[in-house]
Amino acid sequence: MERTFLAIKPDGVQRALIGEIISRLESKGFTLVGLKLVKVSRELAEKHYDVHKERPFFPGLVDFITSGPVVAMVWEGDGVIASARKIIGATNPLNAEPGTIRGDFGVSVGRNLIHGSDAPETATREISLWFKDEELVNWQPTITPWLYE
Ligand code: IDP
């Protein structure tokens, strides 16, 4: 089964959207295997967004991600990496389709509520950056036969 790293950013937490966001992924049929509320250090934020370190928005992005609690999660399921990205929607919420998280709740690229890994290699990297092995729970929900043939 594939796994992805998702994080509800400080704006999603402050706007009381934690339940709403988790609910969308749960209802889809994905399984939560890791969950914690994190006060993100600058070191972790800079590592997480390392690929953007030369971009003009990088300092503001690091300030923002470290500004308040973040809900760090690992989700599991067939095709979860690409599917979660669809559920999240386009990076700029103004371009995100209605029905996506960013499309329904966001208006600004710098306040787009949630992060999701964009490929298998980044998912592996981000999961190990944010979670220790023992923080991840291997379990199978009883509804699995109703989700997969
Ligand atoms: P993604 O989160 O949809 O994968 P990326 O291009 O990887 O998008 O950008 C990472 C994050 O950096 C975005 O989610 C957004 O918070 C922030 N970001 C990207 N582009 C801009 C920008 O032009 N201005 C401000 N923040 C940006």
Image (cartoon, grey):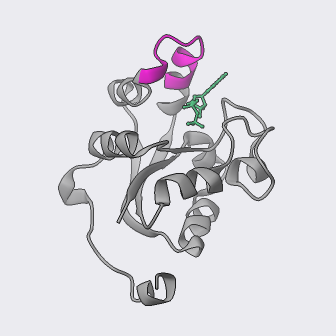
| Residue in the foreground of this view, choosing between 146 and 116 | 146
Q: Which residues are magenta?
A: 51-62
How many numbered circles are shown? Answer: 0
Q: Is residue 135 left or right of residue 25?
A: left
In the rendered image, the vertical position of residue 110 relative to residue 140, given as above or below: above
User: Residue 3, percent across and down?
Assistant: 38, 57
Q: Quadrant of residue 94?
A: top right
Q: Is residue 30 left or right of residue 43?
A: right
User: Residue 70, percent across and down?
Assistant: 48, 45
If the image is split into quadrants, where does the N terminus sit? Answer: bottom left
Q: Residue extending furthest left?
A: 134
Q: Residue at 37% x, 60% y: name it.
A: 2
In the rendered image, the vertical position of residue 29 relative to residue 120, given as above or below: below
Q: Residue at 52% x, 15% y: name it.
A: 59
User: Residue 36, percent across and down?
Assistant: 38, 55
User: Residue 83, percent across and down?
Assistant: 56, 58
Is residue 72 visible to us here?
no
In the rendered image, the vertical position of residue 147 relative to residue 125, given as above or below: below
Q: Is 10 colored magenta in this rendering?
A: no
Q: Residue at 63% x, 53% y: name it.
A: 86
Q: Residue at 71% x, 55% y: name it.
A: 100
Is residue 61 visible to us here?
yes
Q: Is residue 3 left or right of residue 113?
A: left
| Residue in the foreground of this view, choosing between 148 and 115 | 148
| Residue in the foreground of this view, choosing between 59 and 32 | 32
Q: Quadrant of ligand 1?
A: top right
Q: Is 58 colored magenta in this rendering?
A: yes
